[in-house]
Image (cartoon, helix red, strand yellow):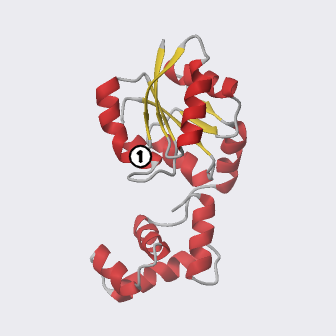
Amino acid sequence: MIRVLLADDEHLIRRAIATLLGLEPDIEVVAEVPRGDLVAQAVRDHGPDVVVLDIEMPGMDGLSVAETLPGHAVLILTSFGRPGHLRRALAAGVRGFVPKDASAEELATAIRKVHAGGRYLDPEMAASAMMAGESPLTERERDALSLAAQGASVAQIAASLHLTEGTVRNYLSSSITKLGATNRITAIRVAQEKGWL
């Protein structure tokens, strides 16, 4: 049996996936968690063979969780198939990336392949990631833009990142230019759509 841990904050979706996977003769859902920050303990408690993570979860997003699980077979199941998310997932060692609108059969196939040590990437998501290219933002530009997306002022961003306000303005201005945006709001939207934030 392939032992699976499911992490998704949407109870109905999580239960539906668990039920569908339970119909597979070789897959057993051994644990379900509604928050990203509960995954590590559940992995220790249940020892799953494959960890299936949603990206958008409270406590800790699925990509950040994946980065804390080196050596574990991780599969991302998401409705947010943004190119930047796929690239970050692969960099974190994630072996599978499947959209939530996939069939139960496709998800089961992906789990089996990931469990066997292979990779399973949704072809459309992989093509989108290749066409979008790498993020043009530096780590500091991404940090500043991410805080701006949360509503932080330049002064708050500067304090949080231990920078001067002038440096933060430069990072934000550079981000706007690199993303072909006209202002900070548009730059945030573009970066979020690409999965770069």
Please tell me whether mark 1 sits on a helix, a strand or a loop. Answer: loop
**To which quarter of the image does residue 41 belong?**
top left
Badge 1 amino acid? Arg
**To which quarter of the image does residue 141 belong?**
bottom left
In the image, residue 2 lies at what x, y percent? 48, 16
Compared to residue 172, the image places residue 106 above or below, namely above
Please name whichever residue, 5 or 90, is drawn nearer the observer in this view of the structure: 5
Please name whichever residue, 20 or 166, is drawn nearer the observer in this view of the structure: 20
Please name the residue shown 63% across and 55% down the image.
Answer: 133
Please name the residue shown 59% across and 40% down the image.
Answer: 13
Please name the residue shown 64% across and 49% down the image.
Answer: 129
In the image, residue 143 lies at what x, y percent? 41, 68
Q: Is residue 68 visible?
A: no
* Residue occupied by mark 1: 35
In the image, residue 173 lies at what x, y percent? 51, 83
Compared to residue 96, the image places residue 152 above or below, namely below
Please name the residue shown 70% across and 52% down the image.
Answer: 131
